[in-house]
């Protein structure tokens, strides 16, 4: 069975940090409702991709940062 993960360790760390920042900004209430909703949606997408290890955009573009191609 082929491994479906395509997000590497560094990508996972960056996505996790960015998702926390975006979700915090969305909850803080500094921006309008629309902007907060967009920030929250982006934060959730990044959080899901970092926690599952699968990025759909990477799959469409054929990018894989998980497996070493040495």
Image (cartoon, rainbow, N blue to C red):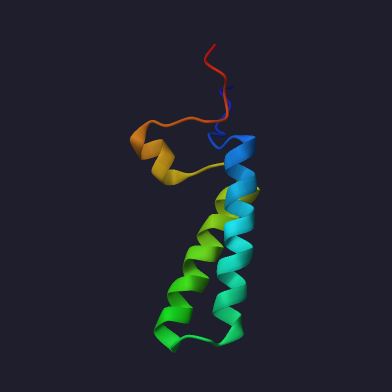
Rendered-image quadrant of the C terminus: top right
Where does the image place residue 36, in percent across and percent down from the top left?
Answer: 48, 80
Where does the image place residue 34, in percent across and percent down from the top left?
Answer: 40, 83
In front of the other: 4 or 70: 70
Most extreme residue toward the front is: 30
Q: From what the image shows, is residue 48 above or below residue 56?
A: below
Where does the image place residue 68, in percent across and percent down from the top left?
Answer: 57, 19
Where does the image place residue 59, in percent across and percent down from the top left?
Answer: 41, 37
Residue at point 64%, 36% (across, down)? 9
Q: From what the image shows, is residue 42 above or below residue 3?
A: below
Residue at point 52%, 72% (across, down)? 40
Q: From what the image shows, is residue 15 above or below residue 27?
A: above
Rendered-image quadrant of the N terminus: top right
Q: From what the image shows, is residue 43 above or below residue 14?
A: below
How many numbered marks have been drawn onto this rendered protein structure? 0
Most extreme residue toward the left is: 61
């Amino acid at each position: 069975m082929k491994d479906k993960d395509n997000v590497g360790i560094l990508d996972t760390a960056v996505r996790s940090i960015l998702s926390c920042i975006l979700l915090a900004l969305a909850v803080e209430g500094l921006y309008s409702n629309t902007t907060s909703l967009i920030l929250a949606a982006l934060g959730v997408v990044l959080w899901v991709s970092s926690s599952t290890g699968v990025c759909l955009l990477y799959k469409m573009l054929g990018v894989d940062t998980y497996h070493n191609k040495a």
